[in-house]
Amino acid sequence: MENGTYFYLMLFENIGCIRYVFFGLGFILYCAIVLFNFLIILAVFLERTLHLPMYILISFLSINSLFGTTTFFPRLLTDLLSNTHSVSRAACILQAFVIYSYASNEITILMLMAFDRYVAISKPLQYNNIMTPRILSVLISISCIYPMLCLGIAGILNARLTMCGNKLWKVYCHNFEIVKLSCANTIVNNVFGLFILATTLIMPLSFILYSYVKILIICRKSSLDFRRKAYQTCVPHIVILLNFSLAIFCEITLSRVATLELPTELSVILSLEFLIVPPILNPLVYGLKFPEIRKKVQCIIKSCKKL
């Protein structure tokens, strides 16, 4: 095989029979992710009373979870059972593109959810005029297309690099790890990577923080009943946001800080948290917290049992 044509995922080497335990756990987890997120999507799609911005954004969060995990888990499960752990350069760059598109889309969708709650709480009388279906469609399109466009350009820049190594110390393809294997000048890749980080992560998180600070200020001046209703809809979003922010922070820290020494098992777990925990946590939090979604999911389950 030509150097640079294939990459090798080295963390799958020498894991012995424990691979079958990991395969079983991974398969069960993937099935649970697909089932839970599919139920949320189906509930929002079938129930007309859930055709509101807040619930539509929750369903898009589930769609995005399926988008990201469907690229990661099948490859992971295949590698766990395989004796060779090579992946072509084109397939590796494509997997990295999808995984980081998923991560970027997650943040931008959470940003739209924060904006939706801010408008609903700060301008309840104008809410229906501001969050119209057309405006919501435009916001969702921009929030998904922009990160994917940026990451597509990053993938093209990575594909043009000359590789001097082919060993990736990850269980999935990683943009920054691919760049580090290059012996060419990577200044453009690194600068563009920081630009993507700033526009698809730091700016959305700053806007989310601003929105929730404004919501808290409004709630402090409002009645107890108003505060209770506001907190009831905002708390699930904040829980999801904190979890995902922590997962992304761990992933970025482990990738960028070369001097950080952690046990291999712990490094793998922390680097995979953003791909495993949010997709399973999101449907559970929203399915249990919002009675409208919970009731429709229960109806779907009962209908399936009758069939």
Image (spheres, rainbow, N blue to C red):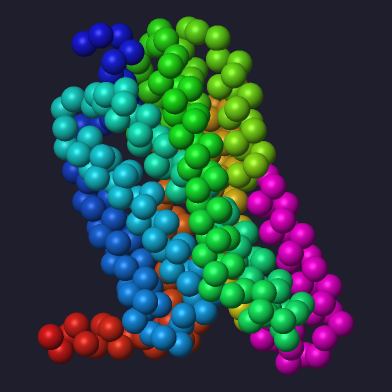
Which quadrant of the view contains residue 17? top left
Taking the view exactly as shown, the residue that stands out farthest to the front is: 134
- Relative to the observer, which residue lies in front, 19 or 51? 51
Q: How would you classify the magenta stretch by its main secondary structure?
A: helix
**Would you say residue 149 sits in the magenta stretch?**
no
Residue depicted at x 40% and y 42%: 98
Taking the view exactly as shown, the residue that stands out farthest to the right is: 221
Q: Is residue 234 in view from this perspective? A: no
Which segment is the magenta one? 202-230
Q: Is residue 190 in view from this perspective? A: yes
Quadrant for the N terminus, please.
Answer: top left
Position of 61 compared to 77: left or right? right
Residue depicted at x 62% and y 45%: 201
Relative to residue 11, is residue 163 depicted above or below?
Answer: above
Position of 244 compared to 269: left or right? right
Residue depicted at x 66% and y 79%: 129
* Residue 162 image position (x, y, % from top left): 42, 10
- Relative to the observer, which residue lies in front, 111 or 143? 143
Residue depicted at x 64% and y 71%: 116
- In the rendered picture of this protein, how many numbered marks are placed on residues? 0
Which quadrant of the view contains residue 122? bottom right
Which quadrant of the view contains residue 146? top right
* Residue 297 image position (x, y, % from top left): 34, 82
Relative to residue 239, is residue 2 depicted above or below?
Answer: above
- Relative to the observer, which residue lies in front, 190 or 216? 190
